């Protein structure tokens, strides 16, 4: 029986030693996981910062583009040579009096009402509708 007690005590000592080794391994694994978590967190922060930097750069490009969109000169600022070339010329018919000229006056350059009518007329022709204005 004393031998049996000796075996039980030896087994208990071995279990205690195995338990200590397991705890050491678990602590080491916990430390390694904590280190990997910190590295992952640092990588996520770096990725977030680089994404934010790209977003800022894109936003600045869009703001620059938006500010350049309105930078084209308006019709009043066009040079006279361009405005004269854009204006349609009325055909000269000999013997035409002033009243006839007023009636057949060509539309002014940049007259949006006439442009709308022209679009409507072209759509009527395209869709085969009768042109009744």
Image: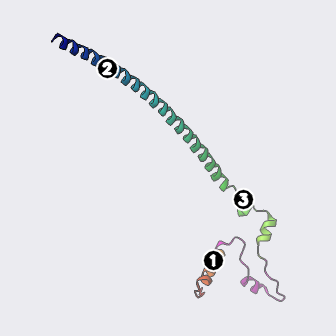
Considering every residue shown, the one lying at the far right of the view is 94
Dot 3 alpha-carbon crowd within 10 angstroms: few under 14, some 14 to 19, many 20 or more: few
**First to last magenta residue range:** 89-113
Considering every residue shown, the one lying at the far top of the view is 2
Q: Earlier in the sequence, mark 1 or mark 3?
A: 3
Residue positioned 79% across, 77% down in the render: 89
The residue singled out by tag 1 in the image is 119
Q: Nearer the viewer, residue 117 or 54?
A: 54
- In the figure, residue 52 lies in which quadrant? top right
Residue 97 falls inside the magenta stretch = yes
Q: Earlier in the sequence, mark 1 or mark 2?
A: 2
Number of numbered discs: 3
Regarding mark 2 in the picture, which secondary structure is present there?
Answer: helix
Regarding mark 3 in the picture, which secondary structure is present there?
Answer: loop
Horizontally, residue 37 falls left or right of residue 66, namely: left
Dot 1 alpha-carbon crowd within 10 angstroms: few under 14, some 14 to 19, many 20 or more: few
Q: Nearer the viewer, residue 94 or 23?
A: 23
Horizontally, residue 16 falls left or right of residue 94, namely: left
Horizontally, residue 9 falls left or right of residue 70, namely: left
7 relative to 41, above or below: above
Q: Quadrant of the C terminus?
A: bottom right
The residue singled out by tag 3 in the image is 73
Q: Earlier in the sequence, mark 2 or mark 3?
A: 2
113 relative to 60, above or below: below
41 relative to 120, above or below: above
Dot 2 alpha-carbon crowd within 10 angstroms: few under 14, some 14 to 19, many 20 or more: few
On residue 18, the disc is 2
Residue positioned 21% across, 12% down in the render: 6
């Amino acid at each position: 029986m004393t031998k049996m007690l000796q075996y039980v005590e030896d087994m208990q000592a071995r279990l205690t030693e195995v338990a200590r080794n397991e705890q050491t391994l678990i602590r080491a694994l916990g430390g390694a996981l904590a280190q990997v978590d910190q590295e992952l967190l640092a990588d996520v922060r770096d990725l977030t910062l680089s994404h934010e930097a790209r977003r800022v750069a894109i936003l600045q490009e869009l703001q620059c583009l938006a500010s350049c969109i309105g930078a084209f000169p308006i019709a009043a600022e066009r040079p006279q040579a361009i405005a004269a070339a854009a204006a349609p010329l009325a055909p000269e018919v000999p013997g035409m009096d002033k009243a006839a000229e007023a009636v057949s006056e060509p539309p002014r350059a940049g007259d949006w009402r006439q442009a709308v009518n022209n679009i409507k007329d072209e759509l009527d022709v395209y869709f085969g509708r009768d042109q009744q204005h």
